[in-house]
Amino acid sequence: MPTPDRDTVQEILVRNDRDLKIREAVSQAWIDVQEKYPDRAWWRRATTLRAVMWEHSVDRVMGVVGDDNGLAAIQHYDTASFIADDKVLFRLKKADRKLFSSNYPTPLANMFHQHEADLYGHEGFQRVEIVHTFNKFYTALNWIGVVARDDGKIIWDFELRRSVGDAEIVPFPTAPKAPAGDTVVRPIIPGAAEGDDKSEAGDKEA
């Protein structure tokens, strides 16, 4: 099968606004998880949250498939894949900050990113993953996009488009490079010596 081509995959996902709909489906899946599992913070295994999120993501994307004749859902074993326009085969995954997903090392999972072989009886499909990442606290989604890998190497990626009005994720502020006191704007107090702050000037005037 061919190595995934970024332009081809992007063109197919933009068609019929599939990228917008899939992004919204994954975002809505996270809302589902938050609403249905308010006690998830004490779960002992991070894999539990990942598995529940995957189930809801697949369920939501199934709804997108139902409204698009060019999309098809393929069930196999205990997972699911999706086919777009008989050219792109993708699956949904949770990825780390470097955009790598992990799998239970079954032969099929190991072959997904080895593009010299076809899978599931489908010939010539370009295989990619649509992944989501969490922030380090697992309290919000950080990124939703497409990742193409060649075995153990990422060959390209792109973020799925956002709908109009979809707020962009604001990153955490960076740590200050100097003590906060060094960057405070101080008022000018008549009669205060240079370098005195407000409290020191007040003490002298008292």
Image (spheres, rainbow, N blue to C red):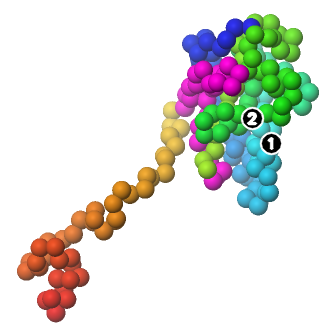
Q: Residue at x 70, y 8 (%)?
A: 2
Please, what is the dominant secondary structure of the magenta stretch?
Answer: strand
Q: Residue at x 68, y 19 (%)?
A: 150
Q: Is there CB contact under 8 Å for labels 1 and 2?
A: no
Q: Position of residue 130 (x, y in %)?
A: 68, 28
Residue at which label 2 appears: 102
Q: Position of residue 168 (x, y in %)?
A: 50, 40
Q: Quadrant of residue 104?
A: top right
Residue at which label 1 appears: 51
Tell me if residue 40 comes above or below residue 103 in the rendering: below
Q: Residue furthest right?
A: 77
Q: Residue furthest front?
A: 152
The quadrant of the image that shows the C terminus is: bottom left
Instruction: Say whether residue 195 is visible.
Output: yes
Q: Is 193 placed left or right of 174 in the picture?
A: left
Q: Quadrant of residue 29?
A: top right
Q: Is 182 placed left or right of 98 in the picture?
A: left
Q: Residues within 10 Å of mark 2 (few under 14, many from 20)?
A: few
Tell me if residue 171 comes above or below residue 7 in the rendering: below
Residue bounds of the magenta highlight: 137-163
Q: Decide which of 164, 22 is in the foreground and name it.
A: 22
Q: Residues within 10 Å of mark 1 (few under 14, many from 20)?
A: few
